[in-house]
Amino acid sequence: MSVNRKHLSVVDKRPRAHPEDADLETAVYDALAHTGDLDPSYIFVTAHGSDVTLAGWVHVSEEISLAEQVTLRTRGVRSVHNELSRDL
């Protein structure tokens, strides 16, 4: 195997959001916003590939599981890391 050194470059190893991640985050947030029994005002959605993390606060405990269910039904989501908590 040969290496063409003229085309070597330095790669930034810091994690970056891909455009697809932003699209998935938007899709999840839109799905949460259109759920009548859920206030997503303090829910923060981040995606890394098809894995989504929900973080933040909800008003009642039932919204925690509802947010997870809605997120799992969103096209492109493979798994949900639910870090939501009930606000104090």
Image (cartoon, helix red, strand yellow):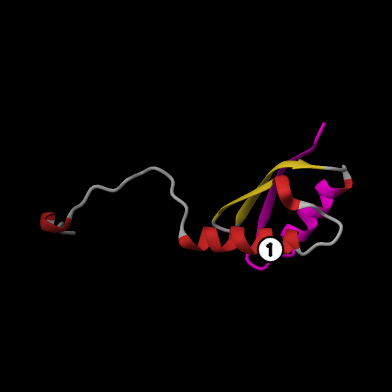
Q: Residue furthest top?
A: 88
Residue 70 covered by magenta stretch: yes
Q: Residue 42's spot in the image, x, y percent?
A: 71, 45
Which image quarter: residue 61?
top right
Instruction: Between residue 17 and residue 49, name the one nearer to us.
Output: 17
The amino acid at mark 1 is Asp
- Residue shown at the point (84%, 61%) measured from the top left: 36
Residue 70 coordinates in the image, percent (x, y): 77, 60
The residue drawn where x is 61% and y is 61% is 26
Choose between 7 and 4: the one closer to the eye: 7
Element on which disc 1 rests: helix
Please determine whether, in this image, residue 62 is positioned above or below residue 70: above
The magenta segment: 63-88
Q: Position of residue 69 (x, y in %)?
A: 79, 57
Is residue 66 within the magenta segment? yes
Image quarter of the N terminus: bottom left
Q: Where's residue 84, x and y in %?
A: 74, 41
Q: Is residue 4 left or right of residue 39?
A: left
Whether residue 29 sits left or right of residue 13 in the image: it is: right
Residue at 11% in and 57% down: 6
Task: Find disc 1 in the rendering and name its residue.
Answer: 30
Q: Residues within 10 Å of mark 1 (few under 14, many from 20)?
A: some
* Above or below for 81 versus 22: above
